Image (cartoon, rainbow, N blue to C red):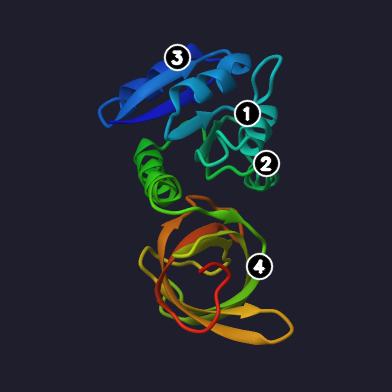
């Protein structure tokens, strides 16, 4: 079983999360956010579920810390909080959170988000290196409604086989796109499909893409 870490100062919620997730994951939990970083580094969880509002050491601070250290920055962070609003969700995205869930929790959606997050993270850990790099590009294709779209975006990280970037168009898993790198000139770079998408209502949500065909130049070889 994949191991996940839950960080929340409310023991009843940690118990509820354990009950709903322990059939698929090995669950470690703590109510002490000050110890969460050490626990994460010692146990190497595949994902971390994190509350925002905790005494002494907020989830915002812990999120920044986890996302800044090389030992933990590849671990998907999923925010589970009673605090809502578009501004909070946008801030969580800026801090590097993979997804955001407001209490009371939709556990079906949470399980799907965990599954997608772990699938997206595995290439980082097992088969190739990803580099944090902002590179402007253009995406073209059909959205989930079958309507054509063209959108300028920028990568958050890249690898030889794919990239992560924001996209305001609604795309289903396995949706196909054409992409071009934008510099002084636009260079057609190939075709890719969506292998992961952020479970979030935030505009310009993040999508993970994997190449199906590379043509012309790409950032990594």
Report which residue position mark 3 lands on.
12
Q: Identify the mark at residue 88; answer none if there is no mark.
A: 2
Q: Are marks 2 and 1 in contact (CB under 8 Å)?
A: yes
Give the CA distance from mark 2 to mark 1.
Answer: 10 Å
When asked about the image quadrant of residue 26, the answer is top left
Location of the N terminus by quadrant is top left
Residue under the point 39% across and 24% down: 17
Residue 136 in the image, given as x and y percentages of width and height: 66, 71
Looking at the image, tell me whether mark 3 or mark 4 is earlier in sequence order. Answer: 3
Residue 117 in the image, given as x and y percentages of width and height: 43, 46
Residue 171 in the image, given as x and y percentages of width and height: 45, 67
Looking at the image, tell me whether mark 4 or mark 1 is earlier in sequence order. Answer: 1
Crowdedness of circle 1 by 10 Å Cα count: few (<14), some, many (20+)?
A: many
User: SS for tag 4?
Assistant: loop
On the rendered structure, is 136 left or right of 118? right
Residue under the point 61% across and 78% down: 181
Of circles 4 and 2, the one toward us is 4
Q: Among all residues in the image, which is located at the extreme right?
A: 184
Query: Is 35 above or below relative to 128?
Result: above
Report which residue position mark 4 lands on.
135
Report which residue position mark 1 lands on.
52
The one nearer the camera, 209 or 106, is 209
Give the CA distance from mark 2 to mark 3.
Answer: 24 Å
């Amino acid at each position: 079983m994949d191991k996940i870490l839950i960080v929340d100062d409310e023991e009843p919620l940690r118990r509820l999360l354990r009950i709903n997730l322990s059939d698929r994951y090995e669950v470690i939990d703590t109510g002490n956010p000050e110890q969460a970083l050490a626990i994460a580094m010692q146990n190497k969880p595949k994902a971390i579920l994190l509350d925002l509002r905790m005494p002494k050491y907020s989830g915002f601070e812990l999120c920044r810390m986890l996302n800044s250290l090389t030992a933990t920055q590849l671990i998907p962070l999923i925010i589970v909080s009673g605090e809502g609003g578009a501004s909070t969700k946008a801030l969580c995205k800026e801090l590097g959170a993979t997804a955001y869930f407001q209490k009371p929790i939709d556990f079906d959606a949470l399980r799907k988000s965990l599954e997608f997050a772990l699938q997206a993270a595995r290439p980082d850990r097992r088969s190739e290196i990803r580099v944090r790099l902002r590179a402007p590009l253009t995406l073209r294709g059909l959205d989930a409604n079958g309507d054509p779209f063209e959108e300028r975006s920028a990568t958050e990280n890249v690898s030889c086989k794919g990239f992560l970037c924001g996209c305001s168009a609604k795309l289903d898993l396995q949706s196909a796109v054409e992409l071009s790198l934008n510099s002084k000139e636009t260079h057609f770079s190939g075709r890719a499909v969506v292998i992961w998408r952020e479970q979030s209502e935030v505009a310009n949500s993040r999508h993970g893409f994997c190449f199906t065909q590379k043509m012309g130049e790409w950032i990594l070889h």
